[in-house]
Image: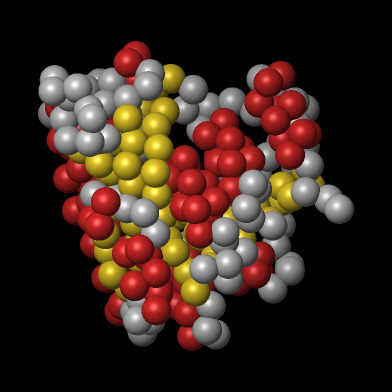
Amino acid sequence: MDRVIVVKVGGATLGSHDTAMEDIVELQKRGKQLVVVHGGGKLITEWLAKQGIPSRFIQGERITDQATLEVAIAVLAGLVNKEIVSSINSLGGRAIGISGVDGTLIEGRIEHKEKGYVGVVTRVNTTVLETLLKTGFIPVIAPIGMNSSDRPTDTPPTLNFNADVVAGEIAAATGAERLIFLTDVAGINDSSGKLLPQLSPDEAEALVDSGAASGGMIPKIKACLRALSQTATTSIIDGRQSHALLREIDGKGVGTTIQVVV
């Protein structure tokens, strides 16, 4: 499992004619073991709007009531997950789509009631990932997971999880070789808007604490910091750029790398 590359595909880049799926298939053909975690926040927002349900966020994470949870499950585990799996398979790859509910992959609990039914990950069960990887499949994971077994009776059995957080937790649990975020921005910028190509964990944390990093970048940075407890290298790159993922793997990427410098 320490050779696994965890790739987080941002919902904002899906459908923007990027080459992420082509790159994923090419890497699989090269013998790389990949685990793909995807978001879908943009599509969730669109489907909520169709039903007249407003979208609200705290520190880049969606506030999830019961109605929002139902839409999130349908969009993430259904529409988005199957779109990615079908794209990989049609390009000659081998992928299977699951959510954190399957095989009890992701377990969590509600810690921040103001966020509603949003889970904080308490356990990652890697058994299902090991099984799929050993049989030559790319697991494509929707960030929906199980509520803990000792959950309060007035809470649902399924929770919505931030996909960035899930990617970081999976990278840490598998001891992944790398964690790569494909986003719709160039990387992490400083307060003046300048791209920062290299950061230490302390420097990345300082950007969050100072407010220089904000919104959806906060959970990405925190996920990178979580992964670095077991993972050598984490990167946040622009997934809209042609073959950004391949270039990153080949050492020619442009974005932000967060790693412990020895």
**Residue 141 position by quadrant:** bottom left
State left or right for residue 216 relative to residue 205.
Answer: left
The foreground one among 141 and 249 is 141
* Total count of labels: 0
- In the displayed structure, 99 sits above or below 189; it is below
**Colour style of the rendered protein structure:** secondary structure
Residue for point 39% across, 79% down = 134
Res. 2 visible in picture: yes
- Quarter residue 47 falls in: top left
Would you say 141 lies left or right of 249 here? left
Which residue is at 32% across, 53% downward? 105
* Residue 161 coordinates in the image, percent (x, y): 35, 37
* Horizontal and vertical percent position of residue 7: 50, 59
Residue situated furthest right in the rendering: 262
Residue farthest to the top, as pictured = 114
The residue sitting at the front extreme is: 150
**Residue 56 position in % (x across, y down):** 34, 20
Q: Looking at the picture, how far across and down is residue 35, in whole percent?
A: 44, 64
Please say if 36 is above or below 45.
Answer: below
Q: Who's the residue at 63% across and 40% down the image?
A: 225
Point 58% across, 71% down: residue = 3
For residue 195, side relative to residue 3 (left or right): right
Q: Nearer the viewer, residue 233 or 125?
A: 125
Question: Can residue 236 be seen in this snapshot?
Answer: no
